C-alpha cells in the first residue's frame, strides 16, 4: 500500500477509503463491518475512477444494507449491551466501586475516574486488551520455546481485517477482536503467527509447523471463515 485517504462515497452517505496500490486493477471491497475500500493503481485517471465507482454504487449500497441488517453493530459499551468475550455472550455492566472483571455471563467495567463516553470506551478497550494479553502471552511463550524462537515481542491493537501479523523482526501483533473468539481460535491464531518466526511465508514447510503444533487447526480456520468477519464488527 502506498497511500490512503478517506472520503464520502459519491451519491451515498457512507465513508470509503481510497488506497493507492502497486497492482494494475481497480477494485471495491465492502467488509462485513461496512468498511468500504476502493483500491487503485497510481496512474488511474479521476474520470475512470469516478465512472468505476458510479457503476458499482448500487452494489456497494446493497452490500452496505445487508451488512447493517445481518451483522453486529459496533459496540457503544453501554450497560445492557451483549458482547461476546472468549466465545461466550456477556452482558455489559458498569460500576464505579468495582474493578473490571468477567463474572459468569457478565462483563463488569469500572468507570471510576471516567465520565465521558470516550473515556469509558478507552477504559473498556484497555480492559479487553489486558485480558486478551493474559490469554495469549502464555501461548506465545510456550510456542516460541518449542520453535527455539528467543527474540520476539507481543502487542495487541485494533485492526480492521487482519487477525495477527509477524514482522521480519518477530514483532507479533494480534487483533483486539480476538477477545471475542473462543479459546481454540485464539490458540490457532497465536500458533499461526509465532510459526512465522521460523517461516515468514505460507509455504508447505510453514503449514507443517502449524500442523505439528496444532493438529486441529483446520477447525479454527473454518470457524474464522464462518464467524470471523462478524467478530471484527464490534470494535471497528
Image (cartoon, rainbow, N blue to C red):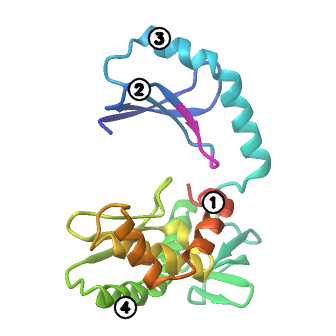
- Find disc 2 in the rendering and name its residue: 40
Q: Secondary structure at mark 2?
A: strand
Q: Which residue is situated farthest in the right direction here?
A: 69
Q: Which residues are magenta?
A: 28-33
Q: Say which of 215 and 223 sits in front.
A: 215
Kindly identify which residue carries mark 3.
48
How dense is the environment of label 1, judged by Cα within 10 Å: few (below 14), some, or many (20 and up)? few
Q: Circles 2 and 3: CB distance less than 8 Å?
A: no
Which tag, 4 or 3, sits closer to the chain's start? 3
Towards the viewer: 48 or 99 = 48
Identify the residue position indicated by label 4 in the image: 142
CA distance for labels 1 and 3: 34 Å
Q: Earlier in the sequence, mark 1 or mark 3?
A: 3
For label 4, the SS is helix
- Judge the density around disc 3: few (<14), some (14-19), many (≥20) Cα neighbours within 10 Å: few
Circles 4 and 2, Cβ within 8 Å, touching? The answer is no
Q: CA distance from mark 1 to mark 2?
A: 26 Å
**In the rendered view, does 155 fall on the left or right side of 83?**
left
Residue 171 in the figure: left or right of residue 103: left
Snapshot quadrant of residue 207 = bottom left
Residue in the image at 43% along x and 25% along y: 25
Q: Which residue is mark 1?
A: 225
x and y percentages locating residue 191 in the rendered image: 43, 78
* Front label number (1 vs 3): 1
Amino acid at each position: 500500500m502506498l497511500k490512503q485517504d478517506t472520503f464520502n462515497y459519491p451519491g451515498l452517505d457512507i465513508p470509503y477509503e481510497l488506497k493507492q496500490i502497486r497492482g494494475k486493477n481497480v477494485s471495491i471491497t465492502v467488509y462485513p463491518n461496512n468498511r468500504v475500500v476502493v483500491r487503485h493503481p497510481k496512474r488511474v485517471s479521476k474520470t475512470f475512477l469516478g465512472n468505476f465507482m458510479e457503476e458499482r454504487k448500487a452494489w456497494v449500497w446493497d452490500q452496505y444494507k445487508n451488512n447493517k441488517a445481518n451483522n453486529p453493530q459496533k459496540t457503544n459499551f453501554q450497560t445492557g449491551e451483549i458482547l461476546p468475550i472468549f466465545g461466550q455472550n456477556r452482558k455489559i455492566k458498569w460500576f464505579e466501586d468495582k474493578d473490571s472483571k468477567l463474572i459468569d455471563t457478565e462483563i463488569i467495567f469500572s468507570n471510576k475516574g471516567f465520565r465521558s463516553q470516550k473515556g469509558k470506551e478507552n477504559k473498556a478497550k484497555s480492559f479487553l486488551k489486558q485480558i486478551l494479553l493474559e490469554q495469549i502471552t502464555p501461548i506465545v511463550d510456550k510456542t516460541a520455546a518449542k520453535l527455539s524462537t528467543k527474540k520476539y515481542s507481543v502487542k495487541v491493537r485494533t485492526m480492521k481485517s487482519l487477525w495477527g501479523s509477524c514482522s521480519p523482526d518477530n514483532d507479533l501483533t494480534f487483533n483486539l477482536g480476538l477477545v471475542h473468539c473462543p479459546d481454540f481460535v485464539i490458540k490457532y491464531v497465536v500458533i499461526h503467527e509465532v510459526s512465522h518466526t521460523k517461516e515468514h511465508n505460507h509455504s508447505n514447510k510453514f503449514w507443517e509447523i502449524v500442523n505439528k503444533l496444532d493438529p486441529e487447526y483446520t477447525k479454527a480456520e473454518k470457524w474464522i471463515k464462518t464467524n470471523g468477519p462478524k467478530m471484527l464488527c464490534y470494535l471497528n
